[in-house]
Amino acid sequence: DTLAANIPCPESRAKTLASFKNIYGENSELARDEAMRSSSMFSMMLMLAAQERGIQTCPMTGCDFEAIHGLLGLVKTYEICMLIALGVASPENKPRERKRLPLSSVLRVV
């Protein structure tokens, strides 16, 4: 209902709500999973857009998400997908060498 209130056109609002109910129904686990997928894709796009502008990013793990949730004053219905550090490298910073697997060893196109 909160999201629907932001859709000014009544016809669009009705279609959007019907779509949400059709996709998620009463399945809160499916709704949470889809929200995590969507926010993960947004996070990836944020990191790519930042990189395009010369800003380095790093997804952070091992965080106390519950404490961060409280620190940000989020309501219980909100969940944190991930934390992303953003910044500009110091000019004297030298990136370390990274050993990567060849793309062919981790990707197979069929």
Image (cartoon, rainbow, N blue to C red):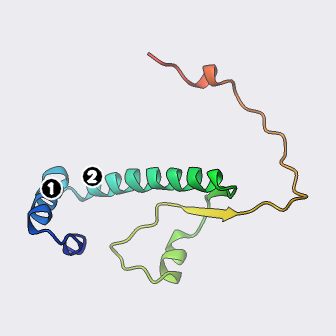
- Quadrant of the rendered image containing residue 1: bottom left
Q: Is residue 89 above or below residue 96?
A: below
Q: Is residue 66 above or below residue 49?
A: below
- Quadrant of the rendered image containing residue 47: bottom right
Nearer to me, 89 or 78: 89
Name of the residue lying farthest toward the top: 110
Q: Is residue 83 above or below residue 54?
A: below
The 10 Å Cα crowd at callout 2, few under 14, some 14 to 19, many 20 or more, is few
Direction from residue 92 to residue 46 in the image, left or right: left
Q: Quadrant of the C terminus?
A: top left
Direction from residue 28 to residue 25 in the image, left or right: left
Judging from the image, what secondary structure is the residue with disc 2 in?
helix
- Quadrant of the rendered image containing residue 73: bottom left
**How far is the residue under mark 1 from the one under mark 2?**
9 Å
Residue depicted at x 11% and y 58%? 15
Residue that badge 2 annotates: 30
Q: Position of residue 10 (x, y in %)?
A: 9, 69
Residue that badge 1 annotates: 25
Q: What's the mark number on residue 44?
A: none
Mark closer to the chain start, 1 or 2: 1
Q: Position of residue 92 (x, y in %)?
A: 91, 58
Residue depicted at x 52% and y 69%? 65
Residue depicted at x 61% and y 56%? 50
Q: Amino acid at mark 1?
A: Gly
Residue depicted at x 19% and y 54%? 24
**CB-based contact (under 8 Å), mark 1 and mark 2:** yes
Judging from the image, what secondary structure is the residue with disc 1 in?
loop
Q: Amino acid at mark 2?
A: Leu
Direction from residue 79 to residue 14 in the image, left or right: left
